[in-house]
Image (spheres, coloured by chain):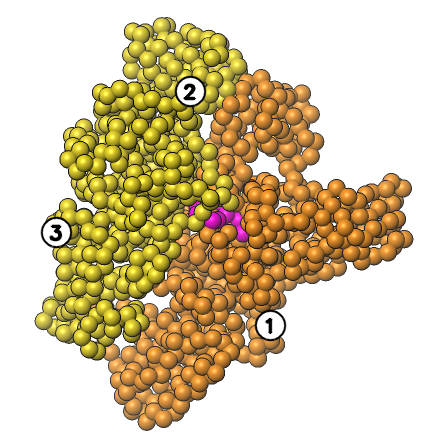
Chain colours: A yellow, B orange
Amino acid sequence: MRYQILYKNCEKIWGPLLAVRGVSDIPFGVFVRITMPDGRKKQGKVLQLENDLALIQVFEGTKDLNAKDTRIRFDYEPFRIPVSAGMKGRIFDPYCRPRDGLGEIISDETRDINGVPINPVRRAYPRDYIETGISAVDSLITLIRGQKLPIFSGSGLPHNEIALEIAKNAKIKDSSGNFIVIFAAMGIKNDDAMKYYASFEKEGKLDNVVLFFNLADDPPMERLIIPRTALTVAEYFAFELGYEVLVILSDMTNYCEALREISSARSEVPSRKGYPGYLYSDLASIYERAGRIKGVKGSISQIPILTMPNDDITHPVPDMTGYITEGQIVLSRELNIAGVFPPIDILTSLSRLMKDGIGEKYTTPEHPHLAAQVYASYAHAKNIRMIANVIGEEELSETDRAYLRFAASLEKEFIHQGTEGRTIDVTLMKAWEMLRILPRKELNKFTDKELEENYGGSR
Amino acid sequence: MKIYKINGPILKCHDDGSVKVKEMVEAGPGKLIGEVIDVSRSSATVQIYDNTDGLKIGQDVYGKGRPLSIRLGPGLIGSILSGLGIPLSTGPSPAAAPAVFNFSPAVTPEEKVFPGTVLGSVPEYGIKHCIMVPPGITGDLVKIQGGPAAPGDTVAEIRTVSGAIEKIGLFHDWPVRERRPFKERLGIAEPFFSGQRVLDFIFPLGRGGCAAVPGGFGAGKTIIQHSIAKWGNADIVIYIGCGERGNEIAQILEEFPELNDPRTERPLMERTIIIANTSNMPVTARESSIYTGITIAEYYRDMGYDVVILADSTSRWAEALREISSRLEEIPAEEGYPAYLASRLAEYYERAGNYLCLSGRKGTITAIGAVSPQGGDFSEPVTQQTKRYIKSFWVLDKDLASERHFPAVSWNQSYSEYIPDLEGWWLDNSKTDWAFLRQKIKDILQEADHLENIVKIVGFESLPDKQKLSILAGDLVKKGFLQQNSYDENDAYCVIEKQIAIARAITDFYDTASDKLKKSVSYYKISGLPAIEKIVKLKFMKFPSDEIENALSSIRGELIELA
């Protein structure tokens, strides 16, 4: 342990920031411990150094700090957290301190929460899928091991319920024992958090989850650490212990707002909508921690959840996210109103890595064609629905009416599944059931053989 | 110099006024590489190309006395470099560079040599890697030594005019921000082929020209860039993964060694150089990555090769500029981008071209940059400024992508200004009046687009037969010609002869069918022809092959028999 100086020369405190004078020999970016006038502790990070002046970001907010009595101590390294296999089934705060009233974790290893960027040369290309139990996702927007696939939602849409369903039902074929879900909540409501915990407990899934909570009334600045803490633990489970890890981050919009707050307090030049110019790099430093590494067992997949302000997909947060992640799952207000759960808009959703993790070696040989067919037929059906709204259903041809029936069934029976988890086999079987509503000649994405085996009946 | 301020990757240092602007520096005990941005009599601002966590006030920064440079020489091909040109791996399995190269001299002692004179060559996979006299050295060759040479060995000695002896090795350093000298710029007269029909035939790019590919996320920018990297007819392909996804680089590293260049039958990796600064790597090195790329491009151009350089994406590069500019507290111009965005873009794209090199050989650099406009809005500064310096503009349309029309190149918004430059080449080399055929295809598309708006109101059935046929022809162009399946073995890459054959089949069909309509053949007789299905399937056939010949002649047959 190095000798640590306690600094008292606090010069200025504003927003989430604190400036202290008279410091020397402080490494840039290190962790800071702050003692409040009443003896309570807060933590922070060095954001800028100039001569003997250090600018510190205070994670837990600057409330109740004063310039005269605040004491500051610098660590000589970036923030580290303990990691251990015993974290399963527990709830932690952003600093990896237990939040569930149970004892401290026992660990002989600590890690820097910033991780180390994966050298692209060392990456293994993602293959093979994760079964989420949600038909629309598994069949059409398949999540691949090592992929980052966000959910674009809006306020009032059931993204948290979907995340919970995925966390409960997600599995990987033939390695079920080595699968774990790490859930980082940023600014979610207290009752939602309770619901999560209760639900995991009820399902007996607590052994397969690690929860990190920063609730809506917790300090917003902690939201900047929590995804990094969660991913550090994920990296330990994936690349040290060989687990297939699924990290759910909810809600990234809250994260970005915390980032904006810091940036504006530092009077940085804003880019779009007041978000800092480095929003892209900062988000990438989180999302790019998903992946697989050559020669190492285990993988990290991510489902970041974000609420699009005013359902605007061109808002900087979903926009920047979409450029980094490998696809997106978009929720539809229209389907939600129609009572469909999960209300996934399959036409605007996309999984970029899907083609490399389904089909012959992984699911069924015709799966790629099946996905293309459902997608194309549903897109066509939506067009017919629009025309039907203008000219009336009676004017449509028999084939066109079949398309309308297909779209209705797809929404009500296939996309809608309530809280029932479906295996991939059930999902694909159901997809065929939907396609059989259409005349066989309309199914042009399949080979004749595939139709022969699955469609049934004659041409 | 001593550090007195640290703000992310930007340092301020006390200095005695001797360090130069753009000089390379090393900072702190970790010797982090950086570059001087501005200087005063007493201080200097430095940008560091690495994570600055752990640096302290008062630590030393040393000027290296030369600008930011990279090492040029054999072994670059097949390698993966960082934004600073440092290998990210010492050779992935497909392209481990040998430590010793076999040098074969091409000149004899006593000869007078000039900058660019080819002294000899070493083999680098399929290509001859020329060892040239570096820029700035003229004199008499005193000694030249063939045989095995390792990095650091001298292969030739030159007595310069001043009488000094210059030792020439296999490698030399070159500052990345400085263009390499050449004799003369030549006009653009030859097309660059990517094997993508919509690009080669409709919106062509000349060798030595510049193109931009703007598109929102999910529109297929990366796939089109990968397709060009795979099938483009260049000797050397430089791919800059600039602020994009790590898994995309992993995909290239997995795919390219498996695929062969259709012209040389050698693995693609043996002509590819990858520069990777993925989105989670230091943002400052993202800014330098495109200069590193274009400098390597110029180096191979000097040997007389045709080089294509792809940057995915230039928007990330511009954002890196913006981020650094904001940390320097510069006054921003549009949307927070610095005012010098346009001039930096020009500096990059203007290094592309068709050149007569110092060696007397001809070489080209073709530059293609992806642009990722925020929110898919093309009025944003990076797209707008880029348009000033490129002549082929390949717009990727989100609506086409959501219809799964790939490549989603919009035929209404895209353009190419190279058509007049390239007409001559087509007449001489393919004996085709390409410009005429191309215009015809564009006319069909335009007519069909116009009619489709009417159909939305009155329905298809209410159109006269002639217009129904126009819609059908538009459909054939889209499905049979423009759409291309990058996962299909035969369709991923389309040679120029096959492009002509398909374009002809469609326009001939349209002409003959229009003619027959006039002779009172009904539309439904035409739309029921099996020939239509055959035209759409032409692209999936091998070329040249009996299969495609048979299909073409049976299409012609059906049309003739139509009565």
Q: Position of residue A171 (x, y in %)?
A: 27, 45
State if disc 2 and disc 1 touch (CB < 8 Å). Answer: no
Figure quadrant of the C terminus of chain B = bottom left
Residue A409: quadrant of the picture: bottom left
Looking at the rendering, the stretch of residues picked out in magenta corresponds to B239-250
Residue B210: quadrant of the picture: bottom right
Q: Few, some or many C-alpha atoms within 10 Å of disc 3 (few <14, some 14-19, many ≥20)?
A: few
Amino acid found under the numbered disc labelled 3: Ala
In this view, the residue in front, A399 or B146, is B146
Q: Position of residue A90 (x, y in %)?
A: 26, 28
Q: Secondary structure at mark 3?
A: loop
Report which residue position mark 2 lands on. Answer: A31
Q: Secondary structure at mark 2?
A: strand
Drawn side of residue A82 relative to residue B292, left or right: left
Amino acid found under the numbered disc labelled 2: Phe
Q: Which label number is shown at residue A226?
A: none
Chain on which label 2 sits: A
Q: Position of residue A273 (x, y in %)?
A: 34, 37
Amino acid found under the numbered disc labelled 1: Trp
Report which residue position mark 3 lands on. Answer: A338
Q: Secondary structure at mark 1?
A: helix
In the figure, B393 relative to A278: above or below? below
Disc with the residue nearer the chain's start (2 vs 3):
2
